[in-house]
Image (cartoon, rainbow, N blue to C red):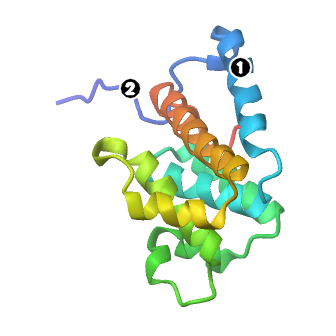
């Protein structure tokens, strides 16, 4: 029997070219969400959300960006199991951001009050709003790139 399915590595469409207004709006949203957030925190959240969503394109891009921002291999490798990482590997703010990002990514059960309250304790409201924005923005990028099969390594 011959497999006639399209290989997963074959891109379906060039989203930026096909939907330029939406693409530019996403770029602007992404920039606004990142504004004044710690670049290392931004990349950790984006890598973790991309892992959860199975977005190879975003995972590849944000791991590279994290390394460029000075992120250590250890912290990148431990992201899937950040809760089990030794104390001190991730700061309390990073842990709160990762917990919130995971719940926003897996929104089915909502965001737990304790997770939200912990993040609210550690992030002033404007920063918390941008962190939430960062979470929904990376989730939107993941969905665009998974749906269109954006090829990793083409950023």
Image quarter where the N terminus lies is top left
The front one of 56 and 24 is 24
Residue 49 in sight from this viewpoint? yes
Q: Is residue 94 above or below residue 89?
A: above
Reply above or below: 32 against 122.
above
Instruction: Report how far apart the C-alphas of labels 1 and 2 lie in the structure.
Output: 30 Å
Upstream in sequence: badge 1 or badge 2: 2
Q: Is residue 26 above or below residue 35?
A: above
What's the residue at 61%, 76% (across, down)? 92
Q: Position of residue 93 (x, y in %)?
A: 64, 70
Query: Which x, y percent locates residue 150?
Result: 57, 32
Location of the C terminus by quadrant is top right
Name the residue nearer the viewer: 130 or 90.
130
| Relative horizontal placement of residue 67, taking residue 13 as reference (left or right) | right
Q: Which residue sits at x=63%, y=88%? A: 88
Instruction: Report the side of 65 relative to 90 (left or right).
Output: right
Q: Which residue is located at x 81 percent, y 44 percent?
A: 35
The percent coordinates of residue 47 (x first, y second) are 59, 56
Mark 2, residue position: 6
Q: Secondary structure at mark 1?
A: helix
Q: Is there any visible trace of residue 97 in the rendered image? A: no
**Figure disc tally:** 2
- Is disc 2 placed on a helix, strand or loop? loop
The residue labelled by disc 1 is 25
Q: Are marks 1 and 2 in contact (CB under 8 Å)?
A: no
């Amino acid at each position: 029997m011959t497999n006639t399915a399209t290989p997963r590595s074959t891109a379906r469409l060039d989203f930026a070219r096909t939907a330029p207004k939406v693409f530019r709006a996403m770029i602007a949203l992404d920039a606004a969400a990142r504004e004044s957030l710690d670049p290392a925190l931004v990349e950790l959240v984006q890598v973790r959300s991309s892992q959860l969503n199975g977005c190879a394109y975003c995972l590849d891009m944000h791991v590279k960006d994290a390394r460029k921002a000075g992120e250590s291999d250890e912290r990148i490798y431990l992201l899937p199991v950040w809760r089990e990482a030794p104390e001190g590997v991730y700061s309390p703010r990073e842990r709160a951001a990762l917990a919130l990002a995971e719940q926003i990514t897996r929104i089915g059960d909502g965001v737990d009050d304790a997770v939200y309250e912990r993040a609210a304790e550690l992030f002033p409201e404007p920063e918390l709003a941008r962190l939430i924005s960062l979470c929904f923005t990376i989730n939107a990028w993941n969905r665009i790139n998974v749906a269109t099969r954006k090829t990793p390594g083409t950023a």
